Amino acid sequence: MIRNALPLVLLLAGVATAAETPADRKCYDAAARWLVTQQHDNGGFGELRGQKGEVGITAIVAKALANAPERLRQELAPALGKATDFLVGTQQKDGSFVLGRAGIPAYRTSVVIMALCAVDKKKYADAIKQGVAYLKGAQLDEAEGFKSDDVRYGGFSYGPVKAGGRGGPSADLSNTAMALAALHEAGVAKDDPVFKRAMTFLRRCQNNSETNDGAGFTPKDDGGFVYNPAAGGKQAPDSYAGMTYAGLLSLVYAGASPEDPAVRAATSWISQNYTLQENRGLGARGSRHGKQAGLYYYFFSFAKCLQHLGQPQLKTAKGEQRWARDLFDVLRARQREDGSFKNADKTWWEGNPVLATAYCLNAMNHARPHLGEGQK
């Protein structure tokens, strides 16, 4: 059980948050304008095996452009339109969004659904509906022979996983978080069975013995989340920031209340480990990744989670934190001269400036409403 929890709280409305500054706008606008210069003639962004336009990266860029502030929308519209056309053109007969034999269809389908919902949910309703049907079918459940006592049950994977064994790609929290976000944004009801099954998997990804039944590992009770509950045998994997924010938001999407012990445990971990200088928890015991690995994905998960929870200010072990202000300050310090971002740690493709910049732009979109007045 988690003790001495420091809950994340929404402070009184009378507490003002700092407004967006000219420096914040300069940071945001430079990132957006740099991104559109990286678009290929076919509308896609990124590359994979010589193919111009990678579905996942294009979708993450498109979602960022679709949510840009009003002052940039007309300027960004041509690039967004071309990117959207590219994405729609990758939908397969089974409803998934993939290009050729690129694979990882659940992940790519999830991010495309979110992009299309941001661009025009009504216009692309049919494509979204087909994508949702594909995602529901991709969940590891009884239809694929998975029983509820299998640690992977209810999760989503990068690729086909066989029931009854632990070989091949396993279910993981990153794919699962993306899928649940896509289903939520597409309007799937919280009482849909897909969320109930996912809740079983989510609880098994958390270092919290109060809610984790130990099907994958024996939790060490710090309240944080891990990437893969099937990895490492019974030894508890280390919790880390990127997965903890993604896990907390996924719990909420799946219907957990603020009083749920899993939610309280996750908020305790966040309160005790608040920082934007590293992906806290990586680089710890037994981790093959350094503290900067996945940093920009972490920024994206951090901001998306806190915006959804309606938290302009947090109480942490360090005191009250204006997280949106902290995020913009960190991003301005890390931004490159041309407006882009790039992680010196290339783990999980973050050495690719298009992906890293798209993560940052999405993070800023989530943070901007909590900077105060002056966003337009």
Image (tube, helix red, strand yellow):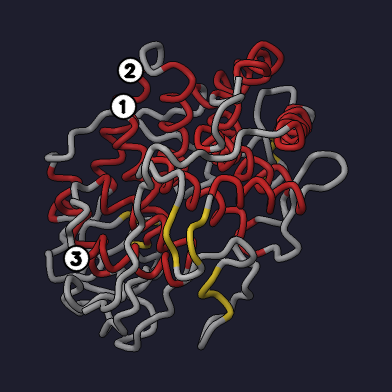
What numbered label is drawn on residue 99?
none
SS of the residue at dot 2?
A: helix
Q: Residues within 10 Å of mark 3 (few under 14, many from 20)?
A: some
Closer to the eye: label 3 or 1: 3
Q: Amino acid at mark 2?
A: Asp
C-beta proximity under 8 Å, tags 3 and 1: no
Q: Amino acid at mark 1?
A: Gln
Closer to the eye: label 3 or 2: 3
Q: Which residue is mark 3?
A: 261
Q: Residues within 10 Å of mark 1 (few under 14, many from 20)?
A: some
Mark 3 → mark 1, Cα distance in angstroms: 35 Å
As drawn, the residue found furthest toward the front would be: 14
Quarter of the image containing the N terminus? Answer: bottom left
C-beta proximity under 8 Å, tags 1 and 2: yes
Tell me what residue is drawn at x 57 percent, y 38 percent.
362
Observer-nearest residue: 337 or 116? 337
Q: Amino acid at mark 3?
A: Pro
C-beta proximity under 8 Å, tags 3 and 2: no
Residue 51 visible from this viewpoint: yes
Observer-nearest residue: 154 or 53? 154
Mark 1 → mark 2, Cα distance in angstroms: 6 Å
Q: Residues within 10 Å of mark 2 (few under 14, many from 20)?
A: few
Percent position of residue 225, x then y? 37, 68
Q: Which residue is mark 2?
A: 126
Where residue 337 sits, quadrant-wise, is top right
Q: Which residue is mark 1?
A: 130
Residue 94 visible from this viewpoint: no
Looking at marks 3 and 2 on the same chain, the residue that comes earlier in the sequence is marked by 2
SS of the residue at dot 1?
A: helix
Task: From this view, report whether residue 269 is shown above or below residue 35.
Answer: below
Looking at marks 3 and 1 on the same chain, the residue that comes earlier in the sequence is marked by 1
- Relative horizontal placement of residue 116, taking residue 38 as reference (left or right): left
